[in-house]
């Protein structure tokens, strides 16, 4: 099953557009999990997965939170745990890789063969030859940075080329030129609903990974109305810190579930067709 097929199935089965980001920050782990950092990262992340798996359409581990603590082994174990216990939930490796030639090929191997991710985030600004090693994995998802959620996004992404903003050029390339295998998606931040609506009009039903909800303050109603497809799906709305650290005590997993449930219901309140 391809990533896009798995994602469509997950949207349908879970009734959710929520994607929980797995960003285990050692400094914020409950005190009982701080003794052995690497093992604590695994146990914390596993508990979050167990607590929220039925409320999400995807999980999104952020590679930096693992590699900064030399916990790559634990990242492998977390993804393997999800695939073994919750195989219907796709896993997106948030790595934002971008390089050329043989280096890009190795990054694709890292994401899809070493870590066994179902999809990976990729920086498209080096051009198609930097993206092609990822899209060559036909059953894997390639999620290209388009209009990111951070305040500085406009510095380059809004620059116009022949009267067209760069982020729209990326969207059009991903949709019309780079998507021969039907496995491309886009990162479009929740903090820019107007631009999200414009990108949706350009690319049809292509899935969006949507950061910026929760701690970054994206407006849920505006974002859902701007980005959803006619079927009321098309979005992987990512929340990390607001879910993971709803409590920093021993009840962290229960608090994470409560926050995820509240956010899923808030999203669903604005979806079409429900």
Image (cartoon, grey):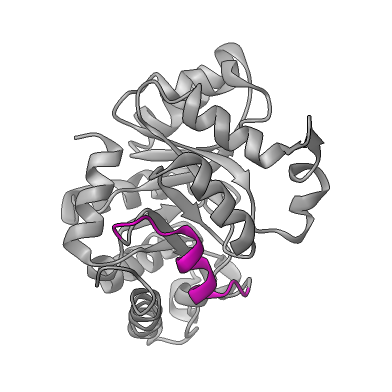
Query: Residue 68, image x and y in percent?
Result: 60, 50
- 242 or 81: nearer the eye? 242
Of the 4 image quadrants, the one containing the N terminus is top left
Q: Nearer the viewer, residue 153 or 122?
A: 153
Q: Is residue 236 above or below residue 262?
A: above
Q: Which quarter of the picture shows residue 125?
A: top right
Q: Is residue 35 visible?
A: yes
* Outermost top residue: 101
Residue beneath the point at 17% across and 56% down: 85
**Which quarter of the figure has residue 144?**
top right
Image label count: 0
- Relative depth, front residue between 146 and 169: 169
x 47%, y 85%: residue = 247
Taking the image as shown, residue 57 lies to the left or right of residue 61, namely left
Q: Position of residue 209 (x, y in %)?
A: 47, 52
- Per the image, is 15 magenta? no
The C terminus lies in quadrant: bottom left
Residue 174 position within the rendered picture, expressed as x and y whole percent measured from the top left: 52, 31
The span shown in magenta is 217-231
Can residue 70 be seen in the rendering of this structure? no
Image-based side of 77 in relation to 242, left or right: left
């Amino acid at each position: 099953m391809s990533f896009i097929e798995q994602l469509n199935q997950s949207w349908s089965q879970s009734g959710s557009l929520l994607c929980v980001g797995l960003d285990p920050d050692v400094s914020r782990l409950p005190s009982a999990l701080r003794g052995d950092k690497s093992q604590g990262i695994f146990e914390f992340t596993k508990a979050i997965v167990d607590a929220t798996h039925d409320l999400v359409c995807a999980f999104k581990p952020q590679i930096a939170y693992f590699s900064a603590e030399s916990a790559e082994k634990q990242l492998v174990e977390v993804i393997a745990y999800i695939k073994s216990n919750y195989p219907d939930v796709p896993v997106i490796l948030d790595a934002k890789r971008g390089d050329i030639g043989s280096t890009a090929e190795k990054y694709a191997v890292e994401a899809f063969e070493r870590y066994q991710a179902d999809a990976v985030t990729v920086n498209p600004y080096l051009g198609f030859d930097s993206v092609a090693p990822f899209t060559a994995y036909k059953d894997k998802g390639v999620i290209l940075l388009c209009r990111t959620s951070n305040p500085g996004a406009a510095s380059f992404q809004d620059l116009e080329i022949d009267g067209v903003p760069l982020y729209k050029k990326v969207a059009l390339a991903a949709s019309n030129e780079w998507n021969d295998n039907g496995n491309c998606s886009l990162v479009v931040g929740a903090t820019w609903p107007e631009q999200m609506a414009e990108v949706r009009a350009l690319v049809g039903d292509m899935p969006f990974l949507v950061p910026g909800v929760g701690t970054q303050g994206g407006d849920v109603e505006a974002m859902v109305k701007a980005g959803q497809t006619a079927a009321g799906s098309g979005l992987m709305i990512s929340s990390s810190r607001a879910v993971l650290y709803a409590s920093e005590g021993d009840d962290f997993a229960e608090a994470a579930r409560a926050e995820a449930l509240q956010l899923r219901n808030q999203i669903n309140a604005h979806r079409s067709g429900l």
